Image: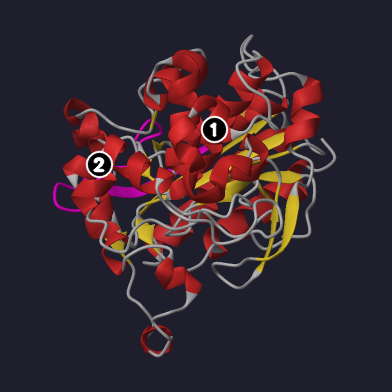
Amino acid sequence: MNKVLSGVQKQVQEAVDQLVDSGAERGVQAAVFQHGEQVVDAVAGTADPATGRPVKSDTPFYNYSIGKGAASTVAHILAERGLFGYDTPVVDLWPEFGAHGKQRVTVRHVLSHTAGVPGIPLDTTLEDLCDWGKMCAAIAGSELWWEPGTKVGYHAYTFGYIVGEIVRRATGKPISQVLLEEVSGPLGVGDELYFGMPHSQQHRLARLEDAPIDPQAMAAMAAMPPDLPMFRAGPMLTMPNAQLGNRADILAADIPAGGKTSARAIARMYAALLGEVDGVRLISTERLREVTTLASSGMDEVFGMPTKWALGYSIGRPGAMDSSSVFGIGGVGGSFAFGDTATGVAFALTKNRLTQDFNAAAELSQLVSDRLRNR
């Protein structure tokens, strides 16, 4: 390993050690690939405080929406194979979805968060989230919030079920099986990257914990009107937190809006989108260009903030959202994973203390970007 690479490995390891030693984080993984080669594998802290089990490189974390990147990747692989196109109406694959005027929604609308179907029923329970048929029937029976393609708004839960049902209808297989067959298995990380994680494997997971919430932030949240779009998109009961993310039934269920992964597994996936990793390339150069190009932007109708989306990936690096060559997605709690088409860098940070920001990911990805930009 040359001096630049040994230097960046050392700096990232020191940074994650400091995050844990300072008490800011409990357990952390950081992984970086460049041009198909892993150049950082740094871990620190505790996966399970109850037993003292340490974080290892292969420890999976429930990283919530980081899994959307894996769901999108599965969709792109199938699109490249010709099972559907981005402008294929969802009803061509899933006829029931067309109820209440949704027949104009295309795969492109779904991947770019412009489909106009961001909400799940307000009486949805955690048990319902684990029932694939019930959730898909509820989404198929829902009404549009806006005309497809005219506005953008984060489809927090619905994204995963819609993409997953498109995959199921196109292949006859659940998306977790397709992920294993087409992505995680070929990349050698079938035991580190999951949607539904078998009960027999859940003992390997890092246990999640909620970071203390700032009293001012809590008061501001309590003062928000209950009819805000973000509250209408899903019941408070289903808001991601540590208790939800440690439940065995949630962990075992296919909920492809989220995923369980190690940092090195999801970084490896982005590396195999950017280029070849140990002989595996997930999509062609031409498709990579197409799926990482800006597809939608504007004020998010659900969360009320500026947003930019490619096809299934957000645009921009945490702390530098003007970085237009970066495609990826973060998860509730502060984890983040992305690829950078300009530098060939694939980055992932996973952690088990759920914070309200992406500060750790921003700090570490900036460090990596600075060191590897001209390599």
Q: Start and end of the magenta stretch?
A: 40-59
Rendering coords of residue 273 (x, y %) = 66, 26
User: Residue 91, which numbered label?
Assistant: 1
- Give the left or right position of residue 32, taking residue 121 as reference: right
Rendering coords of residue 369 (x, y %) = 73, 48
Q: Please report the residue visible at 43 percent of the width from the left and 88 percent of the height from the top.
A: 220
Q: Please report the residue visible at 20 percent of the width from the left and 53 percent of the height from the top.
A: 49
Rendering coords of residue 234 (x, y %) = 37, 62
Q: Please report the residue visible at 50 percent of the width from the left and 29 percent of the height from the top.
A: 166
Q: Is residue 36 above or below residue 280?
A: below
Q: Quarter of the image for the C terminus: give it.
A: top right
Q: Amino acid at mark 1?
A: Val
Say which quarter of the image contains residue 4: top right
Residue 65 visible to the viewer: no
Q: Amino acid at mark 2?
A: Cys
- Give the left or right position of residue 43, taking residue 101 as reference: left
Q: Is residue 56 magenta?
A: yes
User: Residue 130, which numbered label?
Assistant: 2
